[in-house]
Image (cartoon, helix red, strand yellow):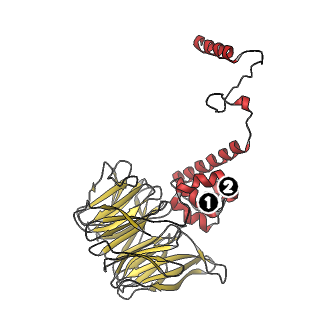
Amino acid sequence: MATLIHTLADHSDDVNYCAFSSSCLATCSLDKTIRVYSLNNFTELPYSPLRGHTYAVHCCCFSPSGHVLASCSTDGTTMVWDTRDGRTLAVLEQPSGSPVRVCRFSPESTYLVAGAADGSLVLWNMQSLKLYRSGNVKDGSLVACAFSPNGNFFVTGSSCGDLTIWDDKMRCLYNEKAHDLGVTCCDISSQPVSDGEHGFRYFQMASCGQDTQIKLWLILFADFLGVELKYKCTLNGHSAPVLACAFSCDGQMLVSGSVDKCVIIHETSTGNTLHTLSQHTRYVTTCAFAPCSPLLATGSMDNTVNIWQFDLKQPCAGNTVENESKVTVEDWSEDDVSAWLCAQDLADFVGLFKMNNIDGKELLNLTKESLTNELKIESLGLRSKVLQKIEKLRMKMISDSVTVPDEFLCPITRELMKDPVIAAETIPWVQLCKCLLLACLCC
């Protein structure tokens, strides 16, 4: 059962988008601002609201680390913010000057995609903050975008109803007419699925549109087959255009928001409706699941963002300590690794690790070279962060597996002593303490 636990009502106009990091929620609005909230108590961070856009803000998204936030606007710019202090890091101008409708970070934070109302598409290099590639869709405005978990490709949706698949060099790989009256949103699950027939592992994608439909697709991306887009099914329930859709972190649920003012949570395996939420009083424009906690945010033209709590099937950060104590890291399943990633603020790598079948044993064998060459994590900072976390796991395994003799432990704190001295049994304990204290005072 989904429970409404909080309502944010700080925007003075329509809420256009909301996005989670592992610790924050960002919302943006027609009122030209972006607001950032802590997930601990849903209070605004000291630097919020972020002001800088001169017209409506259409979209916002966090980088995988959560340290950077991007926002795009009718003013033709995509702004990049530091989430630690609210500083403006860059103002990226769309080359055509057209209103920017959507922006997305790649999973490794290497690139930032920005799509505009004139159909222009820009891939920004996030290290240099320079334009890397640009392109255009054939017709319509770009209104939707989603990256694959491995970052090898991304999908855009346009107001003319097309879904287009691009590689990371901005080459158009595939185009499909998906929604007759226009695409409004799309999302790709971080969890790959198997077709069960040939053993291929697909990415699951959802799209929604003005035709009131939500469609599920399977995307196969392989060098020897190229790109294949397979229609899976249509999810029903809304009676008006569907404006937003998003997968849960385990890919088992899909949430959608509509002009009918309702939010529907669907089960992706069966297509069944799990919950229908109808607290908003105007069109529901955006919805998002939190990456590591059982939270859902929904935003509306009623100027509010509702926060919902429910029970996730996938293990989240809270389960990780318990799992570590009961199961050795070498015996971790892929789900245990996913839970550990969430607990380490690395939730955006869940899909990438799942797709490569990284269990506990494989996790411990990861190196700088395998992160770079096999998992294609290009960001030096993210590679270093992952390696540091893995090294801590290795050290913990070593310390847990070695039984330390009692005489090597401090009798008071029970911590391992660096240079223990074993006293003769004939020396009383109190006398020894006095001698040690005197030695310390004389030093």
Give x and y (percent) for residue 161: 38, 84
Answer above or below: position of 322 versus 217.
above
Q: Can residue 136 be seen in this view?
A: no
The residue to which callout 2 is attached is 327
Which residue occupies 32% across, 68% down? 299
Residue lying at 56% horizontally and 61% vertically, measured from the top left: 315
For numbered disc 1, what is the local secondary structure? helix
Which secondary structure, mark 2?
Answer: loop
Amino acid type, label 2? Val
Q: Earlier in the sequence, mark 2 or mark 1?
A: 2
Q: Residue at x 31, y 71 (%)?
A: 279
Tally of numbered discs: 2
Q: Mark 2: few, some, or many residues within 10 Å (few <14, many ≥20)? A: few
Q: In this view, does 6 lie to the left or right of 228?
A: left
Tell me the residue at 26%/73% (across/down): 281
Q: To which residue does mark 1 refer?
A: 336
Closer mark to the observer between disc 2 and disc 1:
2
Q: Residue at the far right: name it.
A: 425
- The residue sitting at the bottom extreme is 180
Disc 1 packing (10 Å; few <14; some 14–19; many ≥20):
many
Q: Which of 323 and 14 is in front in this view?
A: 323
Whether tag 2 and tag 1 are in contact, CB under 8 A, the answer is yes
Give the amino acid type for the residue marked by disc 1 in the picture.
Asp
Residue 174 in picture, x, y percent from top left:
49, 82
Task: State whether residue 312 appears in this view.
Answer: yes
Q: Where is residue 260 in the image (x, y as percent from the top left)?
A: 31, 80
Q: Position of residue 397 (x, y in %)?
A: 68, 47
- 213 sits left or right of 338 in the view: left
